[in-house]
Amino acid sequence: MRLDRWFRTHYAQVPHGRLEKLLRTGQVRVDGARAKANTRLEAGQSIRVPPLPDAPPPPGSPKPLSKADRAFLKSITLYEDDDLLILNKPSGIAVQGGTKTVQHIDRLLEGMGDRPETRPRLVHRLDRDTSGVLVVAKRRSVAAKLGRAFQTRSVRKIYWALVHGVPKPPQGKIDAALVKATTPDGDRVRKARPGEQDKAQSAVTHYAVIDRAAQQVALMSLKPVTGRQHQLRAHMAILGHPILGDTKYPSEAELPEGIERRLHLHARRIAFPHPSGEGIVDVTAPLPPHLEAAFAAFGFSPTGGDLDGDAELCGISCG
């Protein structure tokens, strides 16, 4: 790690210009010798840091969590240990901020650490309107390990969705590469066309019909192999069975009477090797209120059948 980056990690209140002055005047030394901002540090070296006056945090620094914020985080926490925090993200709350998004999960995480190395970090994402399991690493090193697990597909994810109609066959695999497309209503993805291989992203989803309400609505178990933006929503629309309440990939069919106009997609369960190397983390998120109401309306049971897809978690393909 470069010396200036080490300072940003451990002394975030020290501006870069102040650090340069401390280095020029020899007040910061590495193993007793003068150093530069780009000096590469090695394990075991000694860094001399002069007494530094307390300084106000730089503009844009995260504010400490309020009592209400802490209570909210506690209310949505499904699992916690020294390395991990696993949340049940409510529908309608963004994971990260944007131009017009001030309240989001990442803002709350920023307020949980007083220094960059103690700040919890997101290791994957959920759409604003998708509810369910969200994994957070409590340290940078844990985030790096979990990032590799997601990249190597050693993480098993199961989503539940209610869709228009009943897919045929009732079990299968959607292998449709996706291309990002900008529309007047915001970013979308669509199925790649011939000749677009250079900008297409491969996307694979296993699906299974768990239950149905006549031919009107089906309860689906969705198991993404890849993790593309809007993958499950786009794939179900490509299959011809959009998810209920999806305004980005809508169905021409009317929403069933009495069903709330919200996205009926829920990150139900996640399982992965613990980053410590000991055991498996396997966490399930209860349904949000609007999905509970829809289950009751259609007569679906959240405990019946192979809803959690144990076979897939054991590595058996459902395709």
Image (tube, grey):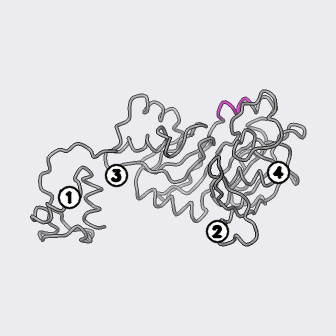
Q: Earlier in the sequence, mark 2 or mark 4?
A: 2
Q: CA distance from mark 2 to mark 3?
A: 34 Å
Look at label 4 and name its amino acid. Gly
Q: Is residue 292 magenta?
A: yes
Look at label 3 and name its amino acid. Pro
Taking the spot 44% from the left edge, 56% from the top edge, the residue there is 142
Q: Nearer the viewer, residue 66 or 285?
A: 66
Give the class, few, some or many, for how many residues have Cα within 10 Å of label 1's Cα (few <14, many ≥20): few
Q: Main secondary structure of the magenta part?
A: helix
Residue 315 image offset from top left, x and y in percent: 69, 60
Q: CA distance from mark 3 to mark 4?
A: 45 Å
Q: CA distance from mark 2 to mark 4?
A: 24 Å
Q: Earlier in the sequence, mark 1 or mark 3?
A: 1
Q: Nearer the viewer, residue 47 or 197?
A: 197
Q: CA distance from mark 1 to mark 3?
A: 19 Å
Give the class, few, some or many, for how many residues have Cα within 10 Å of label 4's Cα (few <14, many ≥20): some
Q: Nearer the viewer, residue 15 or 139?
A: 15
In the rendered image, which residue does mark 4 sit on?
Answer: 240
Give the class, few, some or many, for how many residues have Cα within 10 Å of label 2's Cα (few <14, many ≥20): few
In the rendered image, which residue does mark 1 sit on?
Answer: 17
Find out whether the residues at labels 1 and 3 contact each other: C-beta distance under 8 Å: no
Quarter of the image for the C terminus: give it: bottom right
Q: Is residue 245 magenta?
A: no
Taking the spot 75% from the left edge, 40% from the top edge, the residue there is 244
In the rendered image, which residue does mark 2 sit on?
Answer: 199
Q: Earlier in the sequence, mark 3 or mark 4?
A: 3
